[in-house]
Image (cartoon, grey):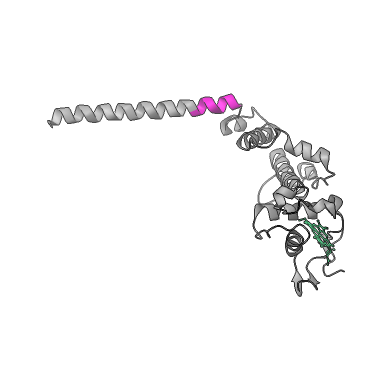
Amino acid sequence: MRKNTRSVLLAALCAACAAVLWATYNYSVAADCDAGIQSVAEVAAGKVGGKGLADAHMDQWKRRNPVRSKDWVAEEKERHKIQPPADNSYLLKGEQGKGHSYGQYTELDILTWSRETEKMVVEGSRIFHSATELGSTVAVSCDMCHPDAANTHPETYPKFQAQMGRVALLRDMINWCIEHPVRGKRFEADDPKMRALEAYIFAQRKGTPLNYGKH
Ligand code: HEC
């Protein structure tokens, strides 16, 4: 191939690549705009407050999880009594934050903490009340024996459990019930379902003092 021809081909190839990259960029920008998500720059410029950003994150999450209904968190909260997480809005008032090594908290921090925490607890409620999510082979969910997580006593763990012959953590007891009354397969300790179940059970005992070892 002559040198000239080779340069012409190379230039054409570069132009084609640039066109593809440009089109992809425009497409992703357009997709973001369609979705109504604010850019970090817009947030920094004060166009949306903390709530706007938290809402945008929530919208984004909902679109990525299309299997669930649009408002599964609200629906689950209507269906079952769920304790709210602690109100941290006091951190935004008065002198707090001054002299704090990480600087002052923002409205966005407070909203993110409570929404994310509550979402995990609500997810736990969904699993707790679903024989399918629990993998039950006998169509039994936890609420059949523990309505609203009654008699789960998370505040008494760790404690010695005779049926296991050792000191159990809350997750061991959750797995015991999954294997025995529910007749499913135990969850790994870091399985998102186990984490959500633990979150829900602890949340339901809000305000109860810890008293490990109590029978
Ligand atoms: C058919 C009834 C039944 C179902 C369904 C059931 N449990 Fe239990 N659960 C029990 C009984 C009975 C005990 C008491 C066992 C013991 O302490 O020896 C218990 C104990 C527990 C405890 C410990 C309570 C304490 O006082 O220490 C936890 C936590 C628990 N269950 C969670 C769950 C979860 C989570 C599910 C669903 C995966 C579930 N259970 C499903 C009957 C049930």
Q: Residue at x 77, y 36 (%)?
A: 74
Q: Is residue 90 visible?
A: yes
Q: Is residue 99 visible?
A: no
Q: What residue range appears in magenta?
A: 28-35
Give the x, y percent position of residue 162. 80, 73
Q: Residue at x 36, y 26 (%)?
A: 19
Q: Is residue 201 above or below residue 43?
A: below
Q: Is residue 56 above or below residue 127?
A: above
Q: Which quadrant of the rendered structure holds the C terminus?
A: bottom right
- Does the magenta run of residues contain 33? yes
Q: Residue at x 45, y 29 (%)?
A: 25
Q: Is residue 45 above or below residue 205?
A: above
Q: Determine the image quadrant of residue 183.
A: bottom right
Left/right placement of residue 153 relative to residue 38 reads right
Q: Residue furthest left?
A: 2
Left/right placement of residue 211 relative to residue 70 reads right
Give the x, y percent position of residue 53. 66, 34
* Overall secondary structure of the magenta section: helix
Give the x, y percent position of residue 155. 83, 62
Q: Which quadrant of the rendered structure holds the N terminus?
A: top left
Q: Nearer the viewer, residue 6 or 45?
A: 6
Q: Nearer the viewer, residue 157 or 130?
A: 130
Disc tally is 0
- Does the magenta run of residues contain 78? no
Q: Nearer the viewer, residue 159 or 117?
A: 159
- Which quarter is ligand 1 in? bottom right
Q: Residue at x 75, y 66 (%)?
A: 169
Give the x, y percent position of residue 184. 71, 57
Q: Residue furthest front?
A: 138
Left/right placement of residue 160 relative to residue 1 reads right
Q: Determine the image quadrant of residue 146.
A: bottom right
